[in-house]
Image: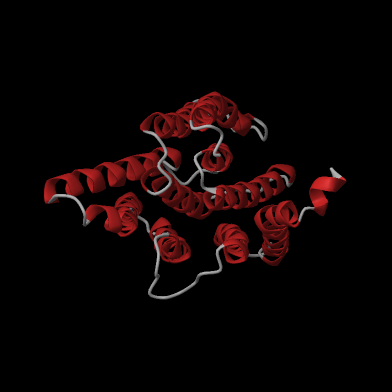
């Protein structure tokens, strides 16, 4: 273990993708918890900001590109998360439910178009439209399924955590260390926020936090499929993992199960499909000669 830590590459991976993002998220989550004791309604907004800040620290240390206008597809990632998360948070506080659904659909559609534009402009109009519509609809449906109402969204957080871990495992097998680092950073910050919310009695993990997680994970999955060359089979299993977690979360909420540790069930159900996606990616890696 000490020999691994002596490697500058491994040390950089651990510090940039795990320890620094975790530290920033923990500091902001704890500060938000105590600073909003008198105003608990603001806690969800600050927790979402903590998740976003922790991920952006990992992004900055790994990719170091906050150019505007963005120069690459990955350069769009922080701006999409920041702007999309802000719009979703504003819509979440509206009285009518259709504001939330409309905002999420528009954000998913706009984000899909921006991320896919380098691919879409090389296709025919019909093929480009079908590709964009498929990604936008899948993104929107998963978003609606994961956060169906204003209840505590810990089950959605657990599901997203499993999805981020799956992406972090699959991406390096498909040749993208960069996406693996982003996935690891997202998984770490989600885990920190979720563990804190589970340990502190009465803490909620509301929609803004889930919105930020869905935005970032969705963008990474688009990059994984269209720019890292992930096979359709691998992507389907990752989507099945998210769908399975969302389905179990809906069942638990419908039956009124809201125990502190009951929320782990969506993650346990979503883990096997995620493991299958990793296995499929490993087979692809081995078939290609292990990357050499």
Percent x, y of residue 19 = 73, 55
> Looking at this rendering, what residue extends furthest in the bottom direction?
68
Which residue is at the front of the view, 166 or 99?
Answer: 166
Q: Residue at x 48, y 48 (%)?
A: 217
Res 131 → quadrant: top left
Which residue is at the front of the view, 233 or 110?
Answer: 233
> Looking at this rendering, what residue extends furthest in the front direction?
292
Res 229 → quadrant: top left
- 123 relative to 243, above or below: below
Q: Residue at x 60, y 61 (%)?
A: 62
Q: How many marks?
A: 0
Give left or right: position of 147 versus 55: left
Percent x, y of residue 184 = 61, 48
Percent x, y of residue 246 = 46, 33
Quadrant of the rendering where the N terminus is positioned: top right
Which residue is at the front of the view, 46 or 224?
Answer: 224
């Amino acid at each position: 273990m000490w020999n691994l830590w002596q490697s500058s590459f491994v040390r950089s991976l651990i510090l940039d993708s795990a320890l620094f993002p975790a530290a920033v998220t923990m500091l902001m989550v704890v500060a938000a918890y105590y600073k909003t004791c008198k105003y608990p309604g603001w806690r969800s907004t600050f927790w979402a900001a903590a998740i976003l800040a922790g991920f952006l620290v990992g992004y900055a240390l790994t990719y170091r590109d906050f150019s505007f206008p963005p120069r690459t597809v990955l350069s769009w990632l922080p701006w999409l998360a920041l702007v999309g998360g802000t719009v979703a948070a504003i819509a979440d506080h509206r009285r009518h439910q259709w504001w939330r659904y409309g905002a999420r659909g528009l954000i998913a559609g706009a984000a899909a178009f921006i991320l896919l534009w380098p691919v879409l402009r090389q296709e025919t109009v019909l093929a480009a439209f079908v590709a964009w519509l498929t990604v936008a609809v899948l993104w929107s449906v998963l978003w609606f399924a994961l956060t169906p109402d204003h209840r505590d969204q810990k089950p959605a957080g657990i599901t997203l955590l499993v999805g981020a871990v799956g992406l972090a495992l699959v991406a390096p097998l498909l040749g993208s260390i960069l996406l693996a680092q982003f996935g690891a950073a997202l998984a770490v910050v989600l885990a920190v926020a979720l563990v804190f919310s589970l340990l502190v009695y009465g803490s909620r993990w509301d929609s803004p936090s889930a919105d930020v997680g869905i935005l970032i994970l969705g963008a990474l999955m688009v990059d994984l499929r269209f720019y890292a060359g992930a096979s359709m089979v691998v992507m389907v299993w990752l989507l099945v993992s998210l769908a399975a977690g969302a389905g179990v979360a809906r069942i638990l909420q419908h039956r009124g199960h809201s125990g502190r540790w009951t929320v782990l069930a969506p993650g346990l159900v979503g883990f096997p499909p995620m493991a299958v996606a990793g296995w499929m990616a490993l087979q692809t890696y081995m078939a290609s000669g292990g990357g050499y």
